[in-house]
Amino acid sequence: MILRFYNLGLRPFHHDEAVHGWFTLKILNTGDYHYQPWAHGPLQYYLTTVVFYLFGTTEFTGRVIPAIIGVLLVASAYPLRRYIGKNGSLFLALFFAISPSILYYSRFFRNDIYIALFAILILIAILRYVDTKKLYWAVSAGIIAALAASTKENAYIVLFIFVSFAILYLIRERGHLKIREIIKTNLPAIISAGIAGLFVYFLLYSFFLQHPSDPFHAIPDALDHWSNYTGGPSGPFYFYIPLMILYELPILLFGILGIIYYWFREKGNVMMLFLSYYFAVSMIIHASIHEKAPWLTIHLILPLAIIAASYLDKLMQMDWNGTKKILTAILGITLVFMAANSLALNYIRFVDPAEPMIQAAQPDMRFAEMMAVTERVAAGIDGYNTSIIVTDNKLETQLLWKLRDFKKIRWRVNINSTLDAPLIFVHDLDADVVEANLEREGYSRMDARILQWYWWKRSDVTLRFILFREMDRASDGYGVVLFYKGE
């Protein structure tokens, strides 16, 4: 909880967080919701709308639910102890607590941490149903699956992995299992889970029955949008491998060792077979789709972390021999490396574009200072009725959120027109022209960035970069300049 809530509102909203914040405010202000694939599913917005209504609209309140979800993800290791061992559950909790990617996106206003938790909870519910045959576990799995599908579209990938594995496993074991009897025995549970899941899915996508036709369009609209989507971040097919090596080394290393161990030593461990399948299919799918973003890393390390934790439980039970000593030393070194990277990423370099886990649309801290100046200047003039001019349309995503309380904003104003507001926002490439026009008007100037990035080269990967993210060149960026007077 400390790791997730400490200075939670300090970092200025990333581009995507600003989009989600603005979309949530739209629901809060209009009292209405319709699914938009580019904004993902409704669950995050419903929960955050309640938080905004009760506690106000800030970066902190926007990230409260993801932080809580992140804490619950760590806690989810506890019910897995019966399947991966007591030591395994402790290792898993440790991985989930300090993993750089999981911790970073537990402090980030977007949906991926939800999907991670729901995937674990579906797994737990299915395992408990298999053990107990109690119907409520099957119903729970169906409801959680619906919550996942109401969160983000990659839930369909997760559900595909669960269903396809079950089918392939039954086909593989058809000579040893009575498949018809299995289906007949479990059919009531499958039907109950399906009905419960569909009801929750319909309820959420229909905005609690206010738009009953919307749920029928949700999946076709999602498939149409994302199958044709060519915008956003991308990268080579191996995009996630360097990220996992750099940030998640003990999970990657011991996860791979675990896959090898269970493949050769415990082939009958169906849970580990499933998790290995989960990791392999996730890697193939995420390597194949156009969008490749650092936040998707958590969906790849999720099954790998459970495998790694289970394997480490086995390792702790081995006799203290040379192999165990070597692996224990490797574990200690890589855990320190991961923890140091996690602390630096989340609390020191949290806006540094030299951190590959930080996607390029992250503003710098100077932008937060710019917004503080904006508030102070406005407070000394006419408060939220102070006139503001914004000239560049690419600044709108951030400023729609940051200037949400201001009433008199003129958007997309030509830089050659009369710029006479006390607060003027322009793109940095236009700033010199604007400054020349305003030089006699008594304006002050302040520069910041709303985007910052590196075009990575192989020569950038040095020991100084791996340990300290030190680069030999400056980053590129998309700047914003504030001209203000009255302070």
Image (cartoon, rainbow, N blue to C red):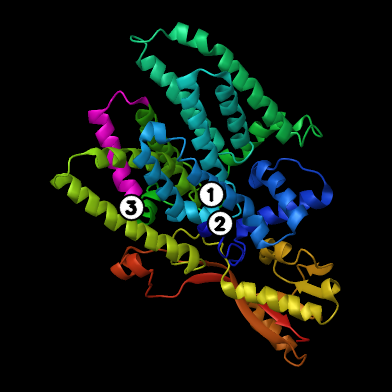
Q: Which mark, residue 107?
A: 2
Horizontal relation, residue 24 to residue 113: left or right: right
What amino acid type is highlighted by mark number 2? Answer: Arg
**Residue 269 located within the stretch drawn in magenta:** yes
What amino acid type is highlighted by mark number 1? Answer: Gly
Q: Position of residue 399 (x, y in %)?
A: 70, 66
Between 166 and 87, which is closer to the camera in this rendering? 87
Q: Position of residue 48 (x, y in %)?
A: 69, 50
Q: Is residue 46 visible?
A: yes
Element type at mark 3: helix
Residue identifier under label 3: 249
Q: Residue 440's image quarter?
A: bottom right
Q: Position of residue 341 (x, y in %)?
A: 39, 62
**Residue 363 located within the stretch drawn in magenta:** no
Tag 3 or tag 1, which sits nearer the N-term?
1
Segment tinted magenta in the rendering: 249-270
Q: Quadrant of the C terminus?
A: bottom right
What amino acid type is highlighted by mark number 3? Answer: Leu
Q: Which mark, residue 70?
A: 1
Between 439 and 187, which is closer to the camera in this rendering? 187
Horizontal relation, residue 143 to residue 307: left or right: right
Mark 1 or 3: in front is: 1
Q: Are marks 2 and 1 in contact (CB under 8 Å)?
A: yes
